[in-house]
């Protein structure tokens, strides 16, 4: 299943590495990354494939959120379908 | 690939602009629960609802978590109880409301609708028993919502039922006086009621519907308001286009959630209701959208035209986004549930008369309006008759959900709590409609009801 992971937090060294390590640990494959700094805030959008992840999707969402909070990041994961529904006909 | 802007726009809509799915409502037919023994009938009602809606709340929560979109309410609507209970050998219909309430609590839903009667042309014995039981039923239950349809374009207005409902509303207010007449917030009087409405308090599962069905109501006044802020000062053509585009996006999301819920619950998808339903939260108000169009205060001259544009553009945008559109679809104007409406009513600009005019062009009617506790039953009936006439003649749904708050005077506030918000008590006209309402009988259907 494809999902969109958004990461927002105060910019510092190593955010991408930490988030990617977190994803890799759970067999979540990164397909695409787009990243920028918006008003001092690190903003990253990742497209990921969760097919090989052991956790059920809803649990994974919660896990990423909690792990993100521990390292000072706001991490959201959502199924890609919601964005496609809204922006693609 | 989705662009960064598109993704951030969606996230902003959800995080900043209060975009949510207002309700997933499961409609359940209770026609199979009829039984001469009232206890057996109640047992069957409870069992069937719990069986059908067992997974409704967990499924809603799972969709919420996976898609990251809040689903505010999970609800149930059932066949009008006056039909289900008609075969029971009993004069007391309160136990049926208690059975619905128990089932709602077991399933964990927010509300259950369908303690209803359809009396647009006449009253059966069962309809009378149900209407008699409404004040007590709403006082002794927590989640049960009741509605009575007193008129339609096809049948005209049943003025006997209108008179009776004025008294029922007064009794309901008195019976729940300790909570400022809260029972009345769960009671709607309709003209042209729809059978697939997912919104409360007026939801019921029509007799033309399937065994069970999933209907979804979307929301999003905050998103429309935000979109209009980007087209300040531009002509109405641009305003309408902007509302349409936004409504399309909101509805696509509703359609996605409806399809997903229907698949997971193995229940047919019914409709998406394209409604702009406000909440008392700041930034989630229909009144503020109207004001954004250039009105100083909602309720001033120009408000009806602004609302007409909004209502129409929401439908035009939404209808392309869903395979089946139904319910009430349009902009809601519940006073107590809309931060901007509350402010406008408190300032004295938004009056009952202006609201009545607005109901000619919005999706429903006079909704969540508090009036002084000494308002007579006849005046309430006359207000219902006026609304029903608007609905009947204009071929649209209209409704009255009015709270004659015991002991409250003009200017007081009535606190409803939660999504129901708080309502400023609004003045009513003092001239009596006693003799008008006392006539009874039926107001004939308008000429344009004869369309065959």
Image: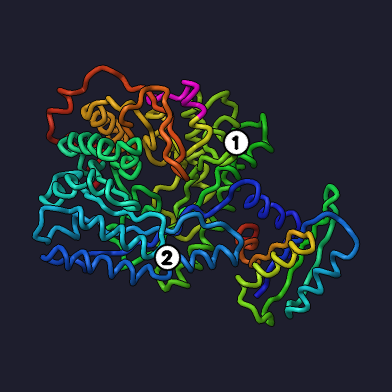
Q: Quadrant of residue B121?
A: top left
Q: Is residue A50 magenta?
A: no
Name the residue beneath numbered marker 1: B237
Q: Residue furthest front?
A: B178
Q: Nearer the viewer, mark 2 or mark 1?
A: 2
Position of B93 with respect to B197 (left or right) is left
Which residue is at a point 76% across and 64% down the rendered structure image? A70
Which residue is at a point 19% across and 54% down the rendered structure image? B82
Question: Subunit of mark 2?
Answer: B
Name the residue beneath numbered marker 2: B269
Residue B212 locus on image (x, y percent)? 34, 67
Residue B103 locus on image (x, y percent)? 32, 63
Q: How many marks?
A: 2
Q: Closer to the N terminus: mark 2 or mark 1?
A: 1
Examine the rendered structure and indicate whether residue B364 appears above or below residue A31.
Answer: above
Which residue is at a point 48% across and 68% down the rendered structure image? B59
Examine the rendered structure and indicate whether residue B80 appears above or below residue B237.
Answer: below
Position of B104 with respect to B256 (left or right) is left
The magenta segment: B343-353
* Other-residue count near label 2 (Cα within 10 Å), few / some / many at <14 / 14–19 / ≥20: many
Q: Nearer the viewer, residue B319 or B9?
A: B9
Secondary structure under the numbered disc 2 in the rendered image: strand
Question: Subunit of mark 1?
Answer: B
Marks 2/1: CA distance? 34 Å
Residue B297 locus on image (x, y percent)? 54, 25
């Amino acid at each position: 299943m494809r999902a969109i992971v958004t990461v927002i937090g105060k910019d510092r060294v190593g955010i991408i590495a930490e988030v990617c390590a977190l994803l890799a640990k759970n067999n979540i494959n990164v397909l695409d990354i787009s990243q920028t700094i918006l008003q001092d805030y690190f903003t990253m959008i990742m497209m990921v494939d969760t097919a090989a992840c052991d956790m059920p999707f809803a649990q994974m969402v919660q896990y990423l959120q909690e792990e993100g909070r521990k390292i000072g990041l706001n991490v959201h994961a959502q199924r890609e379908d919601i964005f496609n529904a809204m922006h693609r006909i | 690939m989705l662009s960064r802007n598109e993704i951030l726009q969606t996230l902003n809509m959800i995080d900043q602009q209060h975009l949510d799915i207002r309700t997933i409502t499961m409609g359940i037919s209770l026609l199979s629960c009829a039984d001469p023994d009232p206890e057996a009938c109640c047992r069957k009602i409870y069992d069937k609802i719990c069986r059908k809606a067992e997974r409704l709340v967990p499924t809603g929560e799972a969709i919420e978590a996976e898609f990251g979109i809040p689903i505010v309410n999970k609800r149930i609507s059932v066949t009008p109880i006056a039909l289900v209970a008609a075969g029971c050998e009993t004069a007391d219909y309160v136990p049926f409301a208690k059975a619905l309430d128990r089932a709602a609590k077991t399933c964990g839903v927010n509300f259950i609708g369908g303690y209803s009667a359809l009396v647009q042309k006449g009253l059966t014995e069962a309809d009378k028993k149900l209407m008699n039981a409404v004040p007590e039923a709403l006082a002794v239950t927590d989640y049960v919502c009741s509605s009575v349809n007193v008129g339609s374009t096809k049948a005209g207005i049943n003025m006997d039922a209108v008179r009776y409902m004025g008294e029922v509303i007064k009794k309901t207010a008195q019976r729940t006086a300790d909570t400022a007449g809260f029972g009345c917030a769960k009671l709607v009087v309709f003209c042209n009621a729809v059978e697939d409405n997912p919104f409360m308090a007026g939801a019921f599962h029509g007799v033309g519907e399937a065994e069970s069905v999933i209907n979804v109501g979307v929301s999003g006044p905050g998103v429309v308001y935000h979109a209009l802020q980007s087209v300040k000062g531009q002509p109405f053509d641009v305003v309408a286009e902007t509302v349409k585009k936004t409504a399309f996006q909101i509805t696509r999301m509703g359609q996605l959630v409806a399809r997903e819920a229907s698949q997971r619950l193995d229940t047919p998808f019914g409709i998406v209701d394209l409604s702009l339903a406000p909440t008392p939260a700041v930034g989630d108000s229909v009144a503020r959208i109207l004001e954004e169009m250039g009105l100083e205060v909602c309720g001033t001259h120009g408000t009806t035209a602004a609302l007409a544009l909004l209502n129409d553009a929401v439908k035009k945008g939404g209808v392309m986004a869903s395979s089946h559109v139904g319910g009430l679809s349009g902009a809601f104007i519940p006073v107590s549930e809309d931060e901007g409406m509350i402010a406008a009513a408190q300032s004295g600009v938004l009056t009952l008369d202006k609201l009545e005019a607005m109901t000619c062009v919005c999706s429903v009617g006079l909704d969540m309006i508090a009036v002084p506790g000494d308002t007579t039953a006849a005046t309430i009936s006359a207000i219902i008759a006026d609304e029903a006439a608007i609905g009947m003649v204009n071929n649209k749904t209209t409704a009255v959900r009015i709270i004659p708050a015991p002991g409250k005077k003009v200017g007081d506030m009535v606190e409803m709590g939660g999504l129901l918000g708080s309502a400023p008590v609004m003045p009513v006209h003092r001239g009596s409609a006693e003799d008008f309402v006392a006539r009874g009988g039926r107001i004939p259907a308008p000429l344009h009801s004869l369309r065959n």
